[in-house]
Structure formats: C-alpha cells, structure tokens
Amino acid sequence: MGDREGVEEQRVDMWAAGDAYDRYMGRWSRPVAGGFVTWLDAGAGLRWLDVGCGTGALAATVAARCRPRAVVGVDRSVGFVASAGAAAPEPARFVVADALALPVHDQAYDLAVSGLALNFLPDPAAAVVEAARAVRCGGTVAAYVWDYAGGMGFLRAFWEAAVQVDPSAAIQDESRRFRLCRPDPLRALWVRAGLEDVAVAPIEVATVFAGFPDLWEPFLAGQGPAPAYVASLAPGLRDRLRDTLGRAVPTRSDGSIALTARAWAVRGRRPGGTALGRAPG
Ligand SMILES: C[S@@+](CC[C@H](N)C(=O)[O-])C[C@H]1O[C@@H](n2cnc3c(N)ncnc32)[C@H](O)[C@@H]1O
C-alpha cells in the first residue's frame, strides 16, 4: 500500500459534523453571507428559503439582519441541520430535505437563496428550476459559490501544495471539479431556468488566520472536499503537504496569515408578478 492508503480517487464530500465544518468553512461562510444579503437588499417582512443551508450561516444572517417574516433552511445533512437548529435565531427553522425535491408548496416564498452549496448538488440546473418553483412570480432566486478558480486564497494555496506533493490530487482540485463557479456559467444557469434581470457580482471577504495551525488544523477535520482529501493521505504525505503549504502561504511578522476569499453571487427574478421591493420597515 502506498502513500494514498490504496485510495485511487476520493470524491466524498463529507457533510456531517457541524462543529468541524464551522471551524473549517463556517467561519468564512458567515461573513460572505453578510455581503450577499447586503447585495440583495431585499427589505423586511419577506419569506426566505435557504437551500443547502448547512449549519445555517445564511439563514442565521437573514434572521439577524433582514427582519424576515419566515426563514426556512433545507439541507440533506441530518448533522448539519441539527447544528443549525441548535444555534438558530428566531424566526429561522431547519428541515432535512433534498434540494432537488423541496418539501414546499409552489410559490410559497419571496426568495429562494443558497450559500456555497450549488456546486455540490448532483444537478445544479434542476436545483435552480426547483428553487424557482418555490418562489412567487416576481420573487428572487439567488445564490453564491466560492471562486475556486482564482479568488479563494487559502483553498487555491491548498490545492497547489497538494498537487506539488501528490500530482494525482489534481483531479480533486475544486477549481477543476467546479467549473460552474464562474460568472458566465452561473449567469447561463439562471437564464436557462427562465429567470429574468439576471445579475452576477463578486463578494470578497478577508480570511485572516492567527497562525499556520489556525489555517492547517481545520483541514484535519474531514468536512468538505479538501479535508476529505487530507483524510485519505498516509501520515508521511500529509506531513509533506502541511510543510509545503506552510512554506507557500504569506506569513506576516506576527505569524498571522492574511488572505482573501471571493465568492460569485448570482440573482434573478421569476417572471410575472411584482418584483421584490423594500417592504415598509
Ligand atoms: C459547503 S456546504 C454549504 C453550507 C452553508 N450553506 C454555508 O454557507 O456554510 C454545502 C451543503 O450542501 C448540502 N447538500 C449537498 N447536496 C445536497 C442536496 N442534494 N440537497 C440538499 N443539500 C445538499 C450539504 O449537506 C452541505 O450542507
């Protein structure tokens, strides 16, 4: 058995342990959720559906900042839904369900949104159509995904280091797996779903790590593609990856590492009806 412990190609995206996910990605998905709701500028008193809600970063942001009438988060992970429910501010609530078969009536929501999840769904195009079914005419369907190809600094550095020590990692590099996560493919997906007034915008957040352990240790927690890849490595190769990554990232004199992470956000309006306006506050 070699360095990879017999694993030829591992593409298991683990979504189960909410606390581990939050240490790895949830801490960055919360600020990007904030940028996203600012960009939507949707106003108060609306009904929101959060598809692929995970541990609830976006739904909690909506509940805290948008004065919604209702917020329902939907995710297939029982563990993540439990974490989301344990920390949810009113009126957010969470249910276990598949994004491709949402357990909601037609046109029951004003907005269907999704954070960092679209590229992990088995059929993103069908998921956008399903989300559009859930919103009223004139309602909004919107999402954001990481810019894996260039703008997501610590993941870019991670996969470049991984390919350096293990060329077979290239096939798992999220920039290669998730070609949807660029402005043109996202716009095309929304247009093909019949949505109108489609717009795409970048959302950038600072990702500052206290030191290299703060950046590296969440990769050992097993949640998501890069940590799942790390879990597949034998200890020797894992150590080489850690050291290569440690040398590659820019470390400041106080030991901290300041990178940025960019997401692409997309939104469109379901035809007919009246567009979302700012409800009287
Ligand atoms: C990267 S996480 C994003 C979670 C959260 N929205 C955030 O911003 O932190 C991707 C999520 O997609 C969910 N997911 C994957 N396939 C799904 C499906 N078919 N239906 C619903 N959720 C799904 C996973 O369980 C996971 O919670």
Image: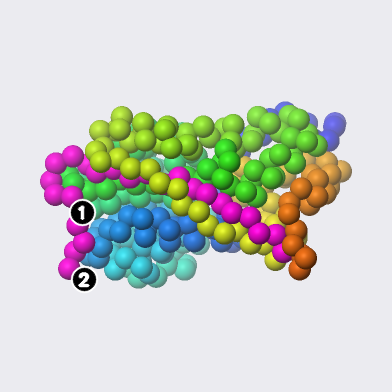
160 left or right, relative to 24: right
The part of the image, by quadrant, that contains residue 95 is: bottom left
Mark carried by residue 151: none
Image quadrant containing the N terminus: top right
Q: For marks 1 and 2, give the CA distance.
A: 14 Å
Image quadrant containing the C terminus: bottom left
The answer to which of marks 1 and 2 sits earlier in the sequence is 1
The part of the image, by quadrant, that contains residue 162 is: top right
Q: Amino acid at mark 1?
A: Leu
CB of residue at label 1: within 8 Å of ligand 1?
no
Q: Amino acid at mark 2?
A: Gly
- Taking the view exactly as shown, the residue that stands out farthest to the front is 253
Q: Residue 116 in the image: x percent, y percent?
A: 48, 47
Q: Is residue 279 magenta?
A: yes
Mark 1 vs 2: CB contact within 8 A: no
Look at the picture and state if 229 lies above or below 189.
below
Look at the picture and state if 112 lies above or below 11.
below
Comparing 165 with 18, the one in front is 165
Residue 55 shows in this picture: no
* Residue under pointer 1: 276
First to last magenta residue range? 256-281
CB of residue at label 2: within 8 Å of ligand 1?
no
